[in-house]
Amino acid sequence: MSNFSILERVEKYSILSMAGALILSYPLGFYLVYIGRMSEQALSYSFKPITFFIAGIPLPFNVSVPIGYLFFSLWTIYIMLGFLGLKMKISNQRPFLKASYAFAILFVINNLIEILQERLGIEIGSLQRTDPLRDFTSYSLAPLTEEIGFRITIIGLVVIIMLTGKLKMSDLLKLLWHPKVENPSDKRYLYFVILGSAVIFGLAHIFGGWKLGKFTEATFFGIFAGILYIKYSLIAPILLHWSFNYVLTSYHYLSSFFQKELYESIFTYFSYLIGITLLFTYFIKKLRVIQQRRKT
């Protein structure tokens, strides 16, 4: 067996392991909310307002939904998106696995950014905590509202404008789901749009209550999410966002519920291990490509 095939296998099983840990959070979150009763009274509370975003601009709607129903609806949506992300192939890749890959790598990058910013005295801050279930529901809602507001209504709409007159209206609308461009100059322009949407996403976190250090993390996330969006459709960035919000919160509250930090620590160190492994395989593969080009 060649070294390259070993590298491919290490990458493949690392991604599958990360995906498995993410999938495990589905029953964990359901257990904490509906069986473990992490906040029994809050199940009947109303969640309002629900804030949507259009091109990065927040639009709060004063609708009132019982938290128990809202969380279950979100949980069901993510179950369906996870199933689709594992079943379907886009650009010959499964979106759930690409989101798992991106999550592990970004998890390591974010923690390196945090360490660097702490040494420089740049604070990230945190959002004000309320009831655990309300917070959990809010974190679970964000991947849908924010990916619509910062990916679809910025990147997707720009692609539609770029291709208006070249495609039928039905094909243009499909670009909101998967904004593909073929022209090389359009692709280069699209990456600038991704960067712009990522910067807007970073600034939105500052105006949303975080401190300056969050801008870097959120901007890096926005770049990853934008690239996933144009390559593997809207499912991939939503699942990446879900991994950071719902999944990390599930493991955090699991530790709090049983008053054992072990559960969260295991997931954290496991994610570090997978992320570092995937970064290593990525750079080794890139080096080999460079070496092959030099030989030719």
Image: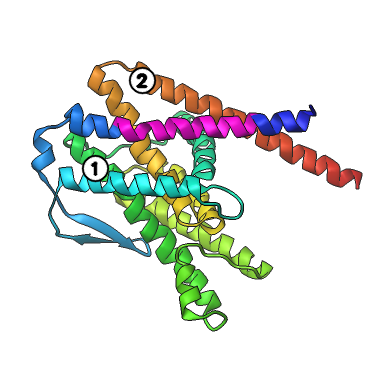
The spot of residue 147 in percent (x, y) is: 39, 55
Q: Is residue 256 left or right of residue 114?
A: left
The answer to which of marks 1 and 2 sits earlier in the sequence is: 1
User: Was residue 27 drawn as part of the magenta stretch in this picture?
Assistant: yes
- Quick check: can you spot residue 78? yes
Of 225 and 73, the residue lying toward us: 73
Q: Which residues are magenta?
A: 10-28
Residue for point 44% across, 65% down: 154
The spot of residue 267 in percent (x, y) is: 42, 24
Q: Main secondary structure of the magenta part?
A: helix
Residue for point 83% across, 40% down: 291
Q: Residues within 10 Å of mark 1 (few under 14, many from 20)?
A: many
**Image height of 209 relative to 7, above or below:** below
**Image height of 237 relative to 129, above or below:** below
Residue for point 34% across, 39% down: 246
Indicate which disc residue 288 carries.
none
Q: Is residue 208 left or right of residue 153?
A: left
Residue that lies at the very extreme toward the right in this rendered image: 296
Residue position for label 1: 137
The spot of residue 201 in percent (x, y) is: 41, 54
Q: Is residue 200 left or right of residue 187?
A: left
- Quick check: can you spot residue 218? no
Q: Residues within 10 Å of mark 2 (few under 14, many from 20)?
A: some
Disc 1/disc 2 C-alpha distance (Å): 21 Å
Amino acid at dot 1:
Thr
Of 23 and 157, the residue lying toward us: 23
Amino acid at dot 2:
Tyr
Indicate which disc residue 263 carries.
2
Q: Quadrant of residue 118?
A: top left
